[in-house]
Image (cartoon, grey):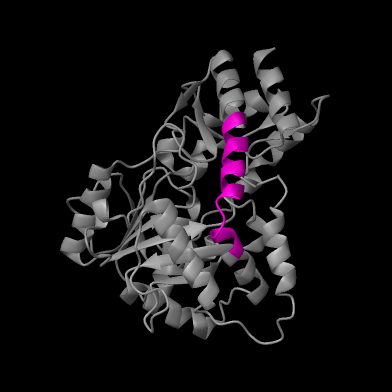
Amino acid sequence: MTARSLPDFPWDSLRPARARAAEHPGGTVDLSIGTPVDPTPALLGDALAAAGDASGYPTALGTADVRTAAAGWLSRRLGVTLADPLGAVPSVVPTVGSKELVALLPTLLGLAGRGTVVIPEVAYPTYEVGAVVAGLDVLRSDTPPEDVADPVLVWLNSPGNPHGRVLTDHQLRAWVAWGRERGVPVVADECYVELGWDVQPRSVLHPAIAGDSHEGLLAVHSLSKQSTAAGYRAGLLSGDPALVQRAWEVRRHLGLLVPTPVQAAMAAALADDAHVELARSRYGTRRDRLRAAVAAAGYRVDHSEAGLYLWVTRDEDCWATVDRLAGLGIVVAPGAFYGPAGERHVRMALTATDERIDAAVERLTA
């Protein structure tokens, strides 16, 4: 693929599998897209409504409330202490969800048209899309590469989408050192950081990884999964103030503004841990049931120690597995969506209702 050609939109290729799954007498169980299905916690809706009188434009910088709440959440939940979150040079800003940030970050940082973006071997497709939009080349690597032409940005994803892999402290520190030696920003997509199952994910901004400075480091977070609020489009960018400021300055020129009522909902969500624990409990129960059924049906689950997905294989081409499961009325995402290294796996999302998870379990174990 050239640096200037966008890939096909991957989900379009699932139409035949969806059509076949729809023929199942018990209906479709859609485990392909990680879209939350549970009710958004009332505290978000209440805060949103209370801030509904919002006649003026919001700022790209974000309200003091949302930046203070974000800094509190990072400290309380992830052990991360930001440089002055309310300072003139920002260390955290709200974003319109995380996908637009991932897709635009190379452009926002002024990297367009030169060099190579390093992404994981098996990766969320938008990392590649963002590089292509900026006219950059892409290198897939799970270890710091010894030889890469003009690296300009590194994307890490831990816990990873699609496979739920969590990078160790040693791996994270190796990437941080590699980036700092070359003056290359290292950006960690940590949207599933609240959903560790077998291990506890660590933020790249944690002092055990970053040391006493966030120089050259950024982290991306989202309320979509942990707060069951994908429709709010609520995300965060934090870390090195110099890099956050560079992205913020371009974002305000582009009018990338999180609506004021959404920022109020974000502040409420980031200050509350109880609703996150409830979501975690729901997903954990679904994970346990679905994982046991997958194993009983003769599949193997790799990685999947965190996040919202099971990374499943029968050691066959992923499209054969997609077709096999569609025959049971179950739709999953082929691993090929996430790079050549994923071609023998499928991704199963935990974002289905208890009733639909139970239906999948019954079909897999029948």
Residue 69, percent from left and from top:
50, 66
Where is residue 118 drawn, in percent x and y?
Answer: 32, 55
- The answer to whether residue 105 is above or below residue 2 is below
Residue in the image at 72% along x and 56% along y? 42
Task: Give residue 366's quadrant in the image.
Answer: top right
Residue 41 position, x and y percent, is: 69, 53
User: Does residue 134 appear in the picture of this structure?
Assistant: no
Left of 170 or right of it: where is 79? right
Q: Where's the N terminus, which quadrant?
A: bottom left
The residue sitting at 30% across, 44% down in the picture is: 142
Q: Is residue 280 magenta?
A: yes
Above or below residue 323? Residue 193 is below
- Classified by dominant secondary structure, the portion drawn in magenta counts as helix
In which quarter of the view is residue 339 placed? top left
Q: Is residue 269 visible?
A: yes
Give, as a single range, the part of the protein colored magenta: 268-285
Give x and y (percent) for residue 299: 52, 19
Residue lying at 24% horizontally and 65% vertically, measured from the top left: 213
Farthest right residue? 25
Q: Decide: is 246 above or below 322.
A: below
Labels in figure, total? 0
The residue drawn where x is 63% and y is 36% is: 282
